[in-house]
Amino acid sequence: MNESGSRVSKSVAEAGREALGADAPMAGANFFELGGDSLAAAKMADGLSTDLGVEVPAELIFDADDLQDLAAKLAARLNEPAP
């Protein structure tokens, strides 16, 4: 995995942990199966927006199959290689 992909993946994992209050591995997990809801998605989107310096709509979290898919979609938005 390259450094830019790692940056996005790490940001997604950290924002997921903060939004869900979880210490569990996040990469292949579905946000909502981990207990996420619309408020947690908004919190996660805000954290990602701040960390990555781009607007991350909560809808992107809703539409992702899992957090790895979310990281790939964010990497594409940032024109970075997929994680």
Image (tube, rainbow, N blue to C red):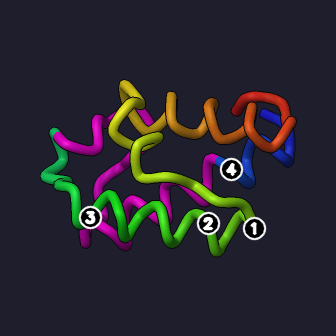
Mark 4 or mark 3: which comes first in sequence?
A: 4
Labels 1 & 3 near each other (Cβ < 8 A): no
Give the quarter of the image for residue 66: top left
Is residue 10 within the magenta segment? yes
Instruction: Identify the residue at horizontal 23%, vertical 66% (top origin).
Output: 39
Residue 32: x and y in percent read 19, 43
- Magenta-tinted stretch: 9-32
Neighbour tally class for label 1: few under 14, some 14-19, many 20 plus, Cα within 10 Å: few
Mark 3 or mark 2: which comes first in sequence?
A: 3
- Name the residue carrying label 4: 8
- Name the residue carrying label 3: 40
Q: Is mark 3 on a helix, strand or loop?
A: helix
Looking at the rendered structure, which numbered label has been put on residue 53? 1
Q: Is residue 7 above or below residue 69?
A: below
Mark 1 or mark 3: which comes first in sequence?
A: 3
Residue 9: x and y in percent read 62, 47
Mark 4 vs mark 3, foreground winner is: 3
Mark 4 vs mark 2, foreground winner is: 2
Residue 53: x and y in percent read 75, 67
Is residue 22 within the magenta segment? yes
Task: Report the Cα–Cα distance between label 1 and label 3.
Answer: 19 Å
In terms of depth relative to the viewer, which is nearer, 15 or 26?
15
Residue type indicated by callout 2:
Ser
Neighbour tally class for label 2: few under 14, some 14-19, many 20 plus, Cα within 10 Å: some
Residue type indicated by callout 4:
Val
Task: Report the Cα–Cα distance between label 4 and label 2.
Answer: 11 Å
Labels 1 & 2 near each other (Cβ < 8 A): yes
Horizontally, residue 69 falls left or right of residue 11, namely left
Task: Report the Cα–Cα distance between label 3 and label 2.
Answer: 14 Å
In terms of depth relative to the viewer, which is nearer, 46 or 4?
46
Task: Report the Cα–Cα distance between label 4 and label 3.
Answer: 19 Å
Looking at the rendered structure, which numbered label has been put on residue 49? 2
